[in-house]
Amino acid sequence: MALSKLVMPFKRLVYREDIYADIIKKHPLAIKQVPYWCQTEQLTKIAFENGCLIDYVDSYYRNYPVRTYYDLYKTLALEGLQKRKNIKPYTRHEEINLTYPNDSEIVRNVGDYQDNIYHAMIEYNCKNYAYIYEKHRDLGEKRLNELIQKCPEMFKHVPKNSQTQELCNKAVKLHGDNIKYVLPKYVTYDMCRDLLMTERKYIDYVPHEYIDTMLEIYVLQSNGSFNLDMLDNKKCLEIALTNTDNIGSLQFLSQLACWRPDKDHMTDDMWLKLFENEPETISNKNFPEKYKTRENYCDALNRGVRLYQIPRIKDLNKFAVTVNGKNISDVKKDDLTNELIEIAKKNLSNYEFISRMTRLGLYDYITDEMYEEYVKNNDDVLWSIPEERITKKIIDFALDKDQAQIRYVRNPTEEMLVNLISKNPRAFCEIDHKHVTYNVALEAFKRDKVTLLYMPPKYKRFFTLFYDFY
């Protein structure tokens, strides 16, 4: 009985409304961290008036601010779009640190009360068009044209009854994949022809009445692979055989020979002509054996073919890595030598070399200096370094680049954590509770009261009890 009398009032102190109100006034998004059973109408109102979004308030209270403060909310949303015009979308770390969310969060939570908010939204970030309610997506022809001009991939969210011939033509011209979302009545011959001139894959979206007249374009242009079902089309074969000087025709015949061995129409001269234009042809299983020579393999490697695309020939390894350092990843582990690795190191950036050596498990070839440069110039890479290779200097460089990387440090010292929090108190959110000591918690609390919400229970209760003394 005595214990319950002691504990219960102490627990209630953890959820003092005045403390939460004080924190939320300064950091409205902190309401995300308030347990739902502690959210009150007063806290909701404070968070809302200071710019919080409805999405972060427990559903029990969500209707309250919308109903009572609709005009204020609309103003906040519009102001938010303008303030955040040049802010990048938040990362997980920034979200944990309670920075404001990006535009799409505002639009996503405006709900039915959008009014003119989507006009401002399109001006600042067209991609947010996807988040507005469907009944608000008809912006008028002029606005929709502006939207598609700035962000053509948003066409798939345009309501069907808002499509026009002009809008569809523009959308497909700017982004070919939009053909999937165009109503059949707006798919024209010219639209299909222009699409096929860019890539073969769009043959699937050509209406049946145009297909026969499009086959010549489909076969003769040389961009993209052929659909397997089109390999059996007699007209395609006829077009290819009557235009054997065309690279597109040779591509068709080589793919036909690969997938339909009984229909091999390729001659040696055709294979060589195709190889001259597309060096990766040498990896085709039907490529004549007599032309699979070391000289041709070297020619292919020199023109960008990767080592894994040709047969494993040990004496080609050095040439391949010299031409393209990335080929070090394709060398058999048993064939790797110090000489090959040194050549790759010269031909790759520090980041690429470390990434490939890490993938191969060859950590001994990576020096401490290379790791230091690696963490100094790249975000969020400390996790990829073996624990035994992490030095204090590497940790310092990593934390200077991004304090959130403290979560990858296995056994941080109290001094390191206190020093980190003194530079950025919000980094406390990333520290594992088992590493939080009294001094670490005190430093975080003194510098930023919002860290109270992220503390282990024992320190949360202590600092809540003595909140007014700090």
Image (cartoon, rainbow, N blue to C red):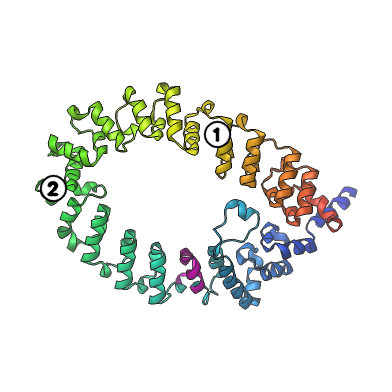
What secondary structure prevails in the magenta region? Answer: helix
Q: Quadrant of residue 435?
A: top right
Amino acid type at image mark 1: Met
Numbered circle sitting on residue 399: none
Q: Residue furthest left?
A: 242
| Residue 8 visible here | no
Q: Residue under circle 1?
A: 370
Is disc 2 surrounded by few (<14), some (14 to 19) or many (20+) residues within 10 Å?
many
361 or 131: nearer the viewer: 361
Q: Position of residue 188 (x, y in %)?
A: 23, 67
Callout 1: SS: helix
Amino acid type at image mark 2: Ala
Q: Left or right: where does residue 449 sit relative to residue 97? A: right
333 or 367: nearer the viewer: 367
354 in magenta: no
Which span is picked out in magenta?
119-134
Q: Position of residue 28 (x, y in %)?
A: 68, 64
Tell me what residue is drawn at x 88 percent, y 48 percent.
3
Callout 2: SS: helix
Q: Quadrant of residue 277?
A: top left
Q: Left or right: where does residue 447 sit relative to residue 60? A: right
- In the rendered view, would you say 224 is above or below 87? above
Q: Residue under circle 2?
A: 240
Q: Position of residue 459 (x, y in %)?
A: 79, 48
Q: Position of residue 437 (x, y in %)?
A: 78, 42
- In the rendered view, would you say 353 is above or below 93? above
Q: Left or right: where does residue 319 sit relative to residue 293? A: right
| In this rendering, the label closer to the viewer, 2 or 1 | 1
Task: Looking at the image, tell me whether mark 2 or mark 1 is earlier in sequence order.
Answer: 2
C-alpha gap between disc 2 and disc 1: 53 Å
Is disc 1 surrounded by few (<14), some (14 to 19) or many (20+) residues within 10 Å?
some
